[in-house]
Amino acid sequence: MSLLNVNDLSISYADVAKPVVNQLSFSVEAGQSMGIVGESGSGKTQTAMAVMGLLPANAIISGSIRFDDQEFLGATPDVMNQYRACRIAMVFQDPMTALNPYVRIGDQLRRILLEHRICKPAEARDRVLAMLQRVGLPDAERQYRVFPHQLSGGMRQRAMIGAALLGEPDLLVADEPTTALDVTVQAQILGLLRDLRSQSNTALLLITHDLGVVAGNCDHMLMMDDGRLLEEGPTRDIFAAPSNERTAKLISASPRINVPSKTTPLPGGVSPVLKIDTVSVSFKERSSSTKSRLHAVRPLSLEVLPGETVAIVGESGSGKTSLARAILGLIPAGSGTISYVGKRLPALVQSRSNEIRRQLQMVFQDPVTSLDPSMRVAEIVGEPIGIHEPKKKKAERERDINEMLQHVGLTSELRERFPHELSGGQAQRVAIARALIVNPSVLICDEAVAALDGTIQSDILHLLQAEQADSGLSLIFITHDLSVVRQISHRVLVLYMGRVCEIATNDELFERPQHPYTKAMLSSIPVPDPNVKQDEVPLMGEVSSILEPPTGCPFHPRCQHAIARCSEDIPELEATASGSVACFRAGELDLSY
Amino acid sequence: MLRYAILRIFGAIPTLLLVIALAFLMVHAAPGGPFDAERMLSPEVEANIARAYHLDESLPQQFVRYVRGLLRGDLGPSYVYLDRNVSEVISRALPVSMQLGVLAMLLAIVVGIAAGLTAALSKNSFIDRFVTGIAMTGISVPVFVVAPVMVLVFAVYLNWFPASWTGGGGVSRLILPVVVLALPQIAYIARLTRASMIGVLSSDYVRTARAQGLRTSSIIRYHALKPAMLPLVSYMGPAIAGILTGSVVVEQVFGIPGLGQFFVTGALNRDYTLVLGIVILYAALVIGLNLIVDLLYGILDPRIGGR
Amino acid sequence: MSYLAAIKPILRKSRDNKTIVACGSLLLLIAAVALIGPLISPHDYAGTDFENSFLSPFGGDWHPFGTDDLGRDLFVRTLLGVKVTLFVAIIASTVSLGIGVAYGAIAGYMGGKIDALMMRAVDALYALPFIFFVILLMVVFERNFLLIFVAIGAVNWLEMARIVRGQTLSLKRRQFVDAARLIGVSTPGIILRHITPNLFGVVVVYMTLTIPQAILVESFLSFLGLGVQAPQTSLGSLVNDGVVHMEGAPWLLLLPATALAVIMLCFNFLGDGLRDVVDPKKNA
């Protein structure tokens, strides 16, 4: 008999017309790993919550959820509590909010042991310490006493996993457990889950939107769309031969890096449209008494050619967003100069002329908060015209607005809507329209597609590329997502803790990376292909704290190729045949694929 | 953390000075002097009085003289109670007001938290609606309406408690004024506790605790109670101010010889120094207690307290 | 333009909220009665009639609320009290709103030292037992009707300033403000066109909560004898007068007190309801 048997599960809410989950049936066997995949809104998280019995009181549920021989739907909280932690446990997406910020980590874990009388109270602490070690938290004694906000994202998630496994459950439900983490840390956490499961034969129900994660971690998968089951079966089979057109489309739209790039490098000899010369960014350390500075970006230089897309890649702590904000003048650069078409720009955007300001625009990560919630779409897109061409007549303005809306793929019936009435994709198009309406030369996209689903993501990217082809727009694309980089960039700049590791053309970077960090990042990306072996964890550890950067090369504590010199000196960026690299061993290492 | 504490303490001093200066200015801006209302005095007597009380000096001079006196603990002579100085008057009245205020605060905290938690835990039930309704009434009906009504009901009709301060002895004369004073705060605290607890109970980390199979009682005890009480700590500052304000009314209604009473009579009679003294005392209390509350909050919230 | 746009969704959602509709309607009804009522009754608020003093409610001759110690009709006087109390409270709240919003928005947006200084001033003023200053003010400047507004406004703007500043700070960090800077909107432009319309929700909620506070202060002043002058009256004065005759003629206290309590309750419930509409995260 299956461990978990879900039959005709339907979930709906009174104020929403369509059911969020519609007649879903599937089962999970003991020891099996089942992935539930779907885009946002497909109902996968609701399903996970239903299995755990955590849906809100106003949810209307029908069908059956049978765990072992206990029917979960309609069971009393007392019965459910007997099963939770000991037979079935859950790991949530965002460990910052999922862990109690007011209680120490050790106490939160200990409470589980005591509540379920898993062991004697005197033994509880030792058990927790053992688990903390088992999930890879260094210095378990210390971690026992800390509060969640004192840990990094990866460590918090390890603690969450530890908490979930304390009761030795038969089934672990994980809702997007790695979505909020850096890709290198994601690989570690997925590796941890694999290890722990192999030791104890715990079944896994993994909820994710990332087909790569499913391909590498789940033997079975089920695909959801719009609340319904699209397809179910062994992962290999579904990838090899999806029986359903929509599944096929989702699989092919899934971002990947092992595809040829569609961009051709630009001819040289052209003068750059934007020149960043030894620009650095630092902040005053607010809470400490010393005048120490937080160095977000160390002096770096970059030239952007007209019509070029330069991707700036980095994980958390890399300084990429600070760099973008400094280029645009939203924050002051600590040193160096930024020049537009040869002219030096004042550091702050307020001091720049309108002429200059219109040339450098930005699209932000969260489309909905980047739009003024009290303004309608037409006003938002029209505001820049009012500032840069105040004398334009109203009729002309309206015409411009409508043209631009069409240009970015929106119908003019959206003109009167407010931002909260738009979908993520629509809102991002509005943001792009607002940025493009003044005809800038450089558009900086700060994680502009990170919050969007796969199919919409690629639509937006195509839109940007089309604009580039049309008008010679230069794009600076800031992201942590290498599949996006692969798709649209000409050149790539890799940042780690504020320093440049490598600058290379698109093909060179992906086929012949020169810096160990680049290689590790590339290897960490889950590939949406179950036939590719993805069991190794390329990079251990986490980014060091910016407040206490390592001596020498910032990457050396995690680098498997480090030598003595790496901890003493800081490598400079040096030109090589295919770009530039900052690594002492660049010449001798061959990291190509 | 220590640094934060020291900064706050030092920051409070200029605030206090500012308060003293403002109060001083206000009091002296009043047209007419303390002795105008009395008999018509001859110019020489007026001049003598002015000199004796230093009223002939310029305002800044008077201010400096006053602050010097403050530092020595001398609040100056009372202009109305001619045979006493302000410190004496205040030290008689202070214990009375303190008694009233402290008891009311304690009552408000105990009853308010109990009511708020009960309401939150049985959200939307009859008890919840009942408690919320009473709390709303407590906020809406002014103290000076409640006070006489309660006197009417409990003292006159039912004769359970004395109607005024002088009417009976000991504890029983305290009960009515303390309850009346506490009522609005009970209401605010109950509402705040309820909202805070409901917020905590719908948080992600409580959901995690449920997923970990904890019973509701365990969740409340080990996960919810502390975060839910934090906003209450912040509220203590305004609560204290509220009690101080309310005490003026209560003292009037019940005829209690506390600081509030003396303030009102002092204001009406232009007793500068007394009024000034009481205002400064209250302000110092509020600033001091706010400081303690802030520091307490910093200790309790691990995100600020830090280690 | 964007100000209207900001209010519309609030109005729409409010229509669905029963509490808001109920309380709002009740308040409008009370206001209407207060305006029309005196036209119906044959009595005048100041007309004394010693023959008929201390009549209990419905004690003949068109006295639905009875009469007071001077034989004046309590019904008409209560309506006048409602008018005066509401009038004072609304005007005073508007004053404190104007000051508070301007102060808070500027402090919040400017940030840094300016913000620190401005909020330090607010902290200092907050610490002052304001009721005392109000009393002092009233005593100092004699019972000037205009001064009542100033006094009340002076007490209430602090809370509004704090709330507005907090909201401005969080708005400032939102990316649409960055976008506006990049487009080239000037600082005053940002405060006026982007920050203030988005403050509306918060401001509306606190307005409905400030009004009861203003009513309390006004009533308290009347209670102390520092409010409106006879024969004009406010609900606070009526209550004060009523207390004196509480034992013999309880209706003189209870009827105006009930009117006061009902108005206060309505505003408080209204404020709560609006808070739910504007910030649905706080939904119970």
Image (tube, rainbow, N blue to C red):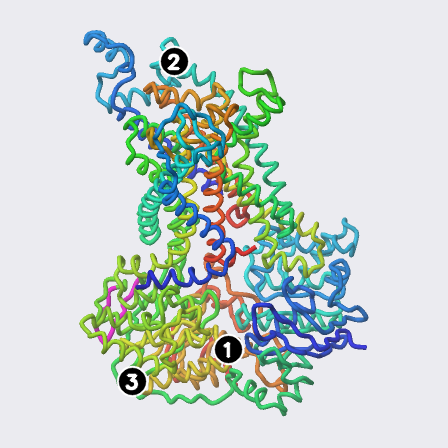
Label 1, on which residue? A453
Prevalent SS, magenta region: strand
Q: Which residues are magenta?
A: A335-346
Image: A23 above or below B116: below
Label 2, on which residue? B85
Image-quadrant location for residue A29: bottom right
Q: CA distance from mark 3 to mark 2?
A: 85 Å
Number of on-image labels = 3
Towards the viewer: A578 or C133? C133
Image-quadrant location for residue B37: top left
Q: Are marks 3 and 1 on the same chain?
A: yes
Mark 3 neighbour density, 10 Å: few (under 14) some (14–19) many (20 or more): few
Residue B10 is at least partly visible in this image: no
Secondary structure under badge 1? loop
Towards the viewer: B192 or C90? C90
Label 3, on which residue? A471
Secondary structure under badge 2? loop
Q: Position of residue B133 (x, y in %)?
A: 57, 44
Towards the viewer: A359 or C66? C66
Label 2 lies in what chain? B
- Residue at point 50%, 75% (across, down): A516
**Amino acid of disc 2:** Asn
- Residue at point 39%, 20% (across, down): B265
Q: Are marks 3 and 2 on the same chain?
A: no
Secondary structure under badge 3? helix
**Amino acid of disc 1:** Asp
